[in-house]
């Protein structure tokens, strides 16, 4: 009898280690995009802090964002030929030249996309987002065009894929069908099935 009581006390008290339910599963590590976005955001905040004079995020404008992008050029790895360089407009120059290295347009464009998202995630309003300013868009477009010209890379706008057009067909309903109370078209009619693609 004692063994039964002690067994019931053991199960009725604190659960043993085997009956402990695991807590929530460990958090998955952030994606590469999320990690990069966090690094970019911290870099931008550090830039504002080191700005002369220091600049508050709330006072940041599109002009400050462009200034930041120009600052990043010193860390670029893309050779961009100046207009006076003999290799200006050559995709594969035969020898090295003294032209500067800059941030590639694609890198800047992706960076602005991440910073734009990070700004709003940190409580910024979309209508006051400095990364979405018109001046920033114009600057990026100018960088894209000038780099394409300097590096001899033809830039062509991607043509938008047009949505397939649906042709509407006039369907005459036979008088006999109208008198039966159908009044509309039957989807199983071959004329309707041919007019609307599946």
Image (cartoon, helix red, strand yellow):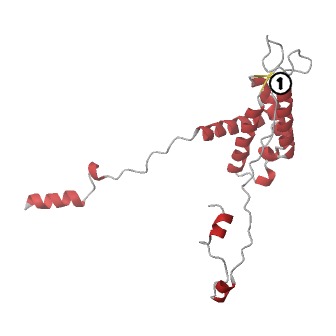
* In-front residue for pair 142/1: 142
| Residue furthest right in the image | 84
| Residue picked out by circle 1 | 152
User: SS for tag 1?
Assistant: loop
The reply to whether residue 86 is visible in this rendering is yes
Q: In this view, does 136 lie to the left or right of 174?
A: right
* In-front residue for pair 72/7: 72
**Which of the 4 image quadrants contains residue 184?**
bottom right
Rendering coords of residue 11 (x, y %): 22, 58
The reply to whether residue 51 is visible in this rendering is no
Rendering coords of residue 93 (x, y %): 80, 15
Q: Is residue 68 left or right of residue 122?
A: right
Can you say whether 178 is above or below 153 in the image?
below
The structure residue drawn at horizontal position 86% and vertical position 41%, both measured from the top left corner, is 138
The structure residue drawn at horizontal position 37% and vertical position 50%, both measured from the top left corner, is 22
Can you say whether 27 is above or below 81 in the image?
below
**Which of the 4 image quadrants contains residue 183?**
bottom right
């Amino acid at each position: 009898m004692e063994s039964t009581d002690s067994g019931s006390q053991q199960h009725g008290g604190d659960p043993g280690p085997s009956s402990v339910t695991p807590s929530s599963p460990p958090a998955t590590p952030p994606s590469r995009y999320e990690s990069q976005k966090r690094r970019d955001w911290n870099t931008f905040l550090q830039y504002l802090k080191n700005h002369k004079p220091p600049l508050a995020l709330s006072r940041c404008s599109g002009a400050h964002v462009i200034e930041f992008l120009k600052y990043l050029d010193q860390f670029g790895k893309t050779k961009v030929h100046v207009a006076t360089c003999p290799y200006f407009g050559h995709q594969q120059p035969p020898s090295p030249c003294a032209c500067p290295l800059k941030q590639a347009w694609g890198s800047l464009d992706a960076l602005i996309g991440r910073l734009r998202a990070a700004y709003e995630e940190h409580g910024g309003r979309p209508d006051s987002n400095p990364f979405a300013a018109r001046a920033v868009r114009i600057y990026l477009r100018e960088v894209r065009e000038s780099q394409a010209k300097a590096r001899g890379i033809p830039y062509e706008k991607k043509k938008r894929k047009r949505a397939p057009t649906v042709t509407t067909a006039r369907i005459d309903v036979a008088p006999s069908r109208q008198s039966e109370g159908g009044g509309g078209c039957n989807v199983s009619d071959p004329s309707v099935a041919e007019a609307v693609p599946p």
